[in-house]
Image (cartoon, rainbow, N blue to C red):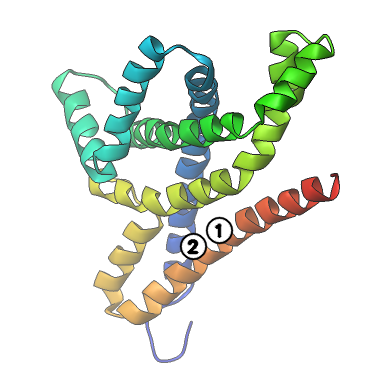
Amino acid sequence: MLDGSDFGLQELLLMARGAGMTLMITFWAVLGGTLMGVVIGLVRSMAPWWINWPLGAVLDIFRSVPLLIQLVLVNSFKSIIGLDVSAFVVSCVVLAFYTSSYCSEIVRAGVQAVPQTTRRAARSLGLSYWQDVRVIVFPIALRVSLPSWTGLTLGVMKDSALVMWIGIAELLRTSQVIITRIQEPLLVLSVCGLLYFLMSYPISRLGARLETKWRDLD
């Protein structure tokens, strides 16, 4: 128990469960969004305009429409059409598509950052098109894209707070419940912010360490 307040172990455990839900949603959203983003990004960087343009238009929808509206609309439509899936699944799917729309641009920019002279040199050495992509383009694009992908992951973790609007008890929602119960908003939000920091810091440090390690390989 913290002196001078009703915030105790029970409230801390409730927030810890909310933090666990935040991490779970973030994990599945980033995993699904990254896998889709890598495929879409590679396609967009190599496909002709008549494939690239409509695909880019679809991605613009996910980037342009606020995430909260996407969550509410999908959660409402799944009930209208009788789709029996939980709000947790809706949250992960919507966030995954939202993540993929940004991740695909990160991958596309990474691929296009590879100099054409490097690619021509690889082909002159006898590498096939797909060997060039796998051995030359993809490793370089990965190193270029890592900082942006790390930032995207941290952003998705914070954006996952919006899922409380469709009934998911993640970290921010549980914090609001505790604030209503004990009327200590500054204390509860300070603990909430600390928990977000503790979840985000290892990701940012891991990204920075990988950047340094790969840079030292040059």
Residues 87 and 28: in front is: 28
**Residue 4 visible at all:** yes
Q: Is residue 90 above or below residue 216?
A: above
Residue at screen point 84% across, 50% down = 216
Question: Label 2 neighbourhood size at 10 Å, few (<14), some (14-19), many (20+)?
Answer: some
State the SS at label 2: helix
Q: How many numbered marks have been drawn onto this rendered protein structure?
A: 2
Residue placed under numbered mark 2 in the picture = 196
The image position of residue 22, as x and y in percent, is: 45, 50
User: Measuring 72% from the left and 50% from the top, which residue is drawn there?
Assistant: 211
Q: Residue furthest left?
A: 80
**Compared to 65, does 104 lie above or below?**
above
- For disc 1, the neighbor class at 10 Å (few under 14, some 14 to 19, many from 20) is some
Do the CB atoms of the residues marked 2 and 1 lie less than 8 Å apart? Answer: yes
Q: Quadrant of residue 89?
A: top left
- Three-letter residue code for mark 1: Ser
Which of 150/17 is in front? 150
Q: Is residue 128 left or right of residue 57?
A: right
The residue shown at (31%, 46%) is 163
> Residue at (70%, 34%) from the top-left corner?
140
Which image quarter: residue 217? top right
Q: Quadrant of the C terminus?
A: top right
Determine if residue 31 is in view.
no
Report how far apart the C-alphas of labels 2 and 1 lie in the structure.
Answer: 6 Å
Q: Residue furthest bottom?
A: 4
Q: Which residue is mark 1?
A: 200
- Is disc 1 placed on a helix, strand or loop? helix
